[in-house]
Amino acid sequence: MQKVKLPNGLTIIYEQKKGNSVVVELQVNAGSNNEEINERGISHFLEHLLFEGTKKRPTNQLISNEIESVGGDFNAYTTNERTCFYVKVLKKHFALAVEVLSDIMLNSLFKEGHIKREKKVVIKEIEMINDEPRFYQWLFLQKNLFKEHPCRYPTYGDKEAIKHLTRDRIYSYFKKQYVPENMTISVVGNVPNWKKEIARKFRMKKNFLPAAGLAQEPRSCAEQTVAEKRKIANTYTLLGFKTVPRAHPDSYVLEVINGILGRGQSGRMFAMIRSKHGLAYDVGSQNVGEVSFGYFAIYATIDKKNVTLVKKLIHQELERLSKISSQDLQEAKNFVEGDYLLDLEDTQKVADQILYWEQVKDAKLMNTFVKEIKKVTRADVRRVVNNYFKNGTFVVLEGK
């Protein structure tokens, strides 16, 4: 892995990987956590808008066709903390990938017509997510689990805020956040002159990005239950706990706990709630570790009449974690290692992980993740359970 910083502040990280493909991914260290109240969703909206037209390629179709016509993949996504754009092509098209990415970053049109049309698209996306309980349940959890941290607001934003976004506000946010000092590019493949090619295309002026602090999240003092009624057949339940950001050592212990509780069909939650009691089809756990926040959640989609029983079973499994065997621990570590390394067989996932760990602290942590997982002890598991798995937030999307 090689890392360089250009004179204008843009960071480039290159990971050589043999094969026919190359991935170029650009990350802007800005997401919904960086937004003001009256611009909720502007980061996600901007991600959409940058695909709508440039001076050289004035339509979305012309932009997409440049990559798709050579069999490549071009996409983007927004989270609470970052906005990423990636291109995956045959390595002989590396220069094209860099050129198209630089074009949408440096030469986007921000036309009023594009903005008006994209507002309709994004609002439809918001409505689609809110209509789908499997997506909405996670937003409902974050909204109620966190009290002060901006991660409690959905990445897609607020419909009214989207409707009232102006071109001036959008462009002002773009000029503030999309500066070289706030951007990192990862290149994964086997290509020469990667630094020269990116430096040639990303001739952006060095710019100052003012530091922005985030609200401090208080510890939970009591368990709470929050319910919302829906006209749906199933009831969706989630029990969540505030934990730690990814850079904290305990985040590795939480990954191992997730391996015990939520791995596939052999995880304890699946075994207890589905295999033994037949109470759910979809059941498991998830550990979320981001730059500035973290949480752990157990989920189960059930019949409304079984809410109390399922909550009781979840708590029983959490209590059992304090008595895990050496075999349980080792199997969980093996699961985390295999799941992580198999994921990195995909060059786009490698490019993405490089950027993620670089934002957390250092891209090289991507290569020490498994080493840290192997260090976790049974005492670590007991300590982490005792520290974080109290005073949870239980959210229920109540079906018929």
Image (cartoon, helix red, strand yellow):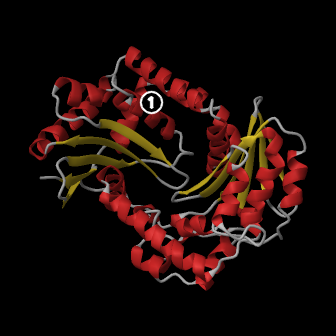
Q: Quadrant of residue 63?
A: bottom right
Q: How many marks?
A: 1
Q: Which residue is mark 1?
A: 256
**Residue 52: x %, y % from top left:** 63, 68
Of the pair 351 and 54, the residue shown nearer to us: 54
Of the pair 247 and 238, the residue shown nearer to us: 238
Query: Which residue is pictured at 61% across the width and 49% down the height?
Result: 360
Query: Which residue is pictured at 74% across the width and 67% down the height?
Result: 57
Of the pair 78 and 360, the residue shown nearer to us: 78
The relative height of residue 326 versus residue 127 in the rendered view (above or below) is: above
Query: Which residue is pictured at 87% across the width and 57% down the height?
Result: 199
Q: In the displayed structure, does residue 45 sit left or right of residue 135?
A: right
Residue located farthest toward the left when viewing the structure as drawn: 305
Q: Label 1: how many residues lie within 10 Å, few (<14), some (14-19) or many (20+)?
A: many
**Residue 119: x %, y % from top left:** 49, 74
**Residue 348: x %, y % from top left:** 64, 41
The relative height of residue 242 versus residue 131 in the rendered view (above or below) is: above
The kind of secondary structure element at disc 1 is: helix
Residue 3 seen in the current view: no
Residue 310 seen in the current view: yes
Q: In the displayed structure, does residue 56 sit left or right of residue 139?
A: right
Tell me the kind of residue under disc 1.
Val
Q: In the displayed structure, does residue 13 sit left or right of residue 216?
A: right
The relative height of residue 305 versus residue 144 in the rendered view (above or below) is: above
Position of the N terminus by quadrant:
top right
**Residue 178: x %, y % from top left:** 69, 68
Of the pair 361 and 39, the residue shown nearer to us: 39
The relative height of residue 359 versus residue 299 in the rendered view (above or below) is: below
